[in-house]
Image (spheres, rainbow, N blue to C red):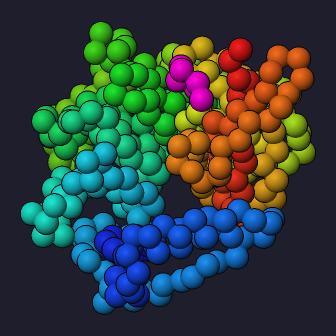
Amino acid sequence: CGEDGLIKLWSLKSSQSLSSGGGDEDGARAKNSAQSRFFQGRQITPIGASDFDASDAQGVLTGHEGKIICIKTAWHGDKLLSGGADKTARLWDLSGAGAGKPLTTLRGHQGLVTSTHFWGQNTIVSASTDRSINLWDMRVGSSPLFALRYHLAPVSDLLLGNRSEPLMVSAGADCSLATWDFRVLSSGGARTESSSAEEAKVENNNQSPSSSKSLRSPMAIMNHIGPTSISSTKNHGSAKLARSIGRDDFSFFSIGDDGIVNEWEAASGRRIGSSHDSGHRDAISGFSTFSASEDLRAARTDKGSGHGGMTSVGGTISCSWDGTVRLRRLSRKCAR
């Protein structure tokens, strides 16, 4: 996706890999060799590259009027969400039935749509530079049912719990963090009000507004910067979020443009452990975590003193406008 408003679908299987022989055994050896070279040394050198041009695209989705900012696929892979500078979020069918056109266009934000997520089978969550987070029910229509309003700056990221966790964490461009409990919405904890978009529609078209419910009090609030930040002189910038690993409860990491990483307990807002510096020296463009089972880095156990060793549970991946991608291994204390 890009500034032309198009979403292009590609196959990661290059023609070179499809035509090359060797069987599964050769493929496994090549994979292991690639992983070995990938993690040897401090400098990562590309193993190989495939160039793509427009003719290689498997499909093109058209509909956005301007730059596309975010995309998100459903867990089953048949649906895709996108958000753009045209202030809309759009739902697409990737199964081939949609013919490249959006199934639904969601209008309600007054700013760029910065993040989109699926929640269950029928609910979509979107965030925007208008400082709001909208919840949409696809069974009802294309107007938001709920608007979450706490942040005083554009919403820079969203992190949703799994299907058994009715929690969501949002991050602002001012490094503010908030945890939301979806159960409050279903229990009537949100109050009804008309959004500015609906008020403008009423004024221009003489229509009656469709009221949405608004919630302004999160379950927990945090600040990525905090009073004990490692650096008080850097530009902290927008915060990005990633799910913690190796923990039973819903906890998460936050990272700012200062490169500092913090870990939090979502429900209470309590910070876990101490901050660490990722080493980046420019704005953060991406942040994620991986588990030990994903084999990005080989799991290892370190011999510790006193209370036993430490076992690797995975790590974090961060990328920055400084031109680097950094992986950090995370360890937890072994059980006795």
Where 203 sits versus 49, above or below? above
> Looking at the image, which is closer to me, 327 or 26?
26
Quarter of the image for the N terminus: give it: bottom left
144 sits to left or right of 16 = left
Task: Look at the image and tell me in which quarter the C terminus lies.
Answer: top right
- The residue at 60%/29% (across/down) is 246
Residue at 21 percent of width and 36 percent of height: 121
Q: Nearer the viewer, residue 136 or 52?
A: 52
Q: Which residues are magenta?
A: 246-251
Q: In the visual, does 69 lie left or right of 19?
A: right
Q: Position of residue 197 (x, y in %)?
A: 32, 43
Helix, strand or loop for the magenta stretch, by majority: loop
Task: Report if residue 82 is visible in the image.
Answer: yes
Residue 301 place in picture, x, y as percent: 74, 36
For residue 290, side relative to residue 331 (left or right): left
Could you tell me which residue is drawn at 21 percent across and 61 percent down?
94
Taking depth in this image into account, of 159 and 49 the one nearest to the observer is 49
Could you tell me if residue 111 is visible in this image?
no
Viewed as shown, does residue 132 lie left or right of 278? Answer: left
